Image (spheres, helix red, strand yellow):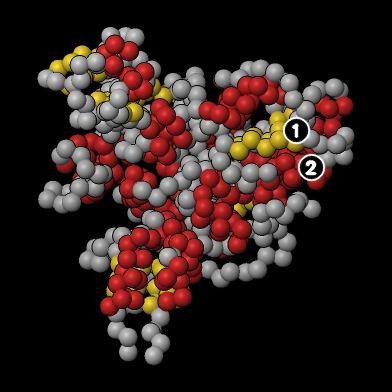
Amino acid sequence: MAQTNNATLIRREIITRLCKLYVENRLEDVDRIALEMAPRNGTQAGGNRCCIHKSRAIIKYRVMALLGFNVSDETDELESLYSYALRALSNKEPEKGVLTVVDEACTSCVKSNYVVSNLCRGCLASHCMVTCPKNAITMEHGQAKIDPLKCVGCGLCKEACPYHAIIYVPIPCEESCPVKAIYRNAEGVEEIDYDKCIHCGRCMVACPFGAVMYRSQIINVLHDISRPNRQVIAMLAPAICGQFKASYGQVATAVKKLGFTDVFEVADGAVLTAKEEARELEEVLGQGQQFLTTSCCPAFVELTEKQLPALKPFVSHTPSPMRYSAELVKQQYPDASVVFIGPCVAKQAEARKYPGIDYVMTFEELGAMMIAMNVDLQTFEAVAEEEVLPERRFAVSNGVLDSVAAYYKGPTLNPLVISGLHKKNIASLRRIATGKHDWNMIEVMACEGGCLSGPAGISSPEVARKLFNAQSGVAEGQPAS
Amino acid sequence: MMNKMVEVSICYGTLCFVMGGAAFEMMGDKLPDDLKDKVTIQGMNCPGYCNTQEQGRPPFVMVNNTLIAEANLNKVIEFIRKEVEHGSNE
């Protein structure tokens, strides 16, 4: 879920600066971003780091990620960001992984989840030492001490201490990851296992140091927009109605102002997804399959591919609204660059798998682009929409199910909605895969409450929900027609 | 005599909104009960404070005649309270 905190705002500021440099034709100054954001004798941007040089180094690697690179792929520390920018523009195929860890920004977390606080009395009984199955605790200077190399994080010492002196200190990224894809390497820096990562974006939101970044493609989008005679089409995800204090029409006008040739609403693709998924559901239930799950959430689909193969056969084969929308775009603009814009990190991973979608941008990047190009939504007139697609509700939990149900004509639906891929719900899905239940249609979204809570949106989930209800024309609870 | 309402103007410019101002959508809901009927909340089009460094960083909110930079909900509510308690009542 998108949060407004300094880590988020710094990322947005960097994206804005990057856009500005590009549109002002000053990309060669990209290496100056770190100097400008962390000036000598200035208040430090980038948080409370040990020194200005560290702050600058961190900003540099943030820019590297926003230029589309994996920070750990650096081979020459002296390679300039400008050189990376040029490499990004030469359009090489991105390698796996959409998320990357800015290692300079990491390492600030505890070495072990259990820490002895100064409430420790160094008691005679030493329950903690006696209880520890790994002999990780010693008594030093009258206080217990946990050896992080030996500690396995079982927590028995915490339970044993009569003074409540041992506390659990979470490592936010690891704690938030529902699939154990982020872990500390030998250097104590977090690393992402891309064979496990489902790109839900939770670690990025969770890290208080903003050390997890998505690899942006915005530089490529800007480049295509600037090319003469190049058509670039924006496809706006249904969650757009909860992003700005503006109607869909105002946003669409603003997006054209940014230089996009035309704007498509992904809700149009969602209509096709809902119809086809309803047909598929009738078909597979008719063939005796027990149930079907939705397939529009790419993090969920990745989950079934990487962690839950037993569930994979039950995932709908219907293309996502993004893919259908891309087909609609191609019919009208066969040679255009197609850019999906949404609140999602996982969509970029999905887009890489299928032809037809050239780039994926986030809503916060869209906002940053508007800032950089001085496009203010308030200057466009709000025109009341005559007809809105109920499929805009693909952005909210329950919405996909309602839309599919509206086209479905098979046996009675017994649906289940799974909202949020946290550990508990993944355990539920594991049980669901065994088939011991009566549900025949299951909607799954990785973000609690649906895409409105996406990790790269602009507003917090509660604000996004409020704006969506006010502006989408398809308030919550309204069934699809 | 009735006290004058405290006027809160939230910058609705895209920059302020993206850089944290979105949170003010919840202003009405998050106001403490004792302040709810003492405040009028309105939007303002971008007054351009973000273009100069002197006024501080976005998002910007005006509470009566005071400009608050790097505004957040708690900061604004505190200013409102100050205005209610000590502000001019003429």
Q: Chain of mark 2?
A: A
Would you name the residue on which mark 1 appears? Answer: A441
Would you name the residue on which mark 2 appears? Answer: A405
**Quarter assignment of residue A214:** top left
Q: Residue at x 40, y 68 (%)?
A: B11
**Quarter assignment of residue A204:** top left
Within 10 Å of disc 2 (Cα), the crowding (few <14, some 14-19, many 20+) is many
Q: Is residue A481 above or below residue A185?
A: below
Q: Amino acid at mark 2?
A: Ala
Q: Is residue A20 left or right of residue A291?
A: left
Residue A361 can be seen, yes or no: no
For the residues labelled 2 and 1, the Cα–Cα distance comes to 10 Å
Please tell me which residue lies in front, A358 or A180. A180
Q: Amino acid at mark 1?
A: Met
Labelled pair 2, 1 in contact (Cβ < 8 Å): yes
Q: Residue at x 42, y 65 (%)?
A: B32
Residue A474 can be seen, yes or no: yes
Within 10 Å of disc 1 (Cα), the crowding (few <14, some 14-19, many 20+) is many
At which x and y percent is residue A22? 37, 49
Q: Secondary structure at mark 2?
A: helix
At which x and y percent is residue A265? 64, 51
Going from N to C along the chain, the mark reached first, 2 or 1, is: 2
Q: Secondary structure at mark 1?
A: strand
Q: Chain of mark 1?
A: A
Q: Is residue A181 left or right of residue A419?
A: left
Query: Mark 2 and mark 1, same subunit?
Result: yes
At which x and y percent is residue A222? 44, 47
- The disc at residue A467 is none
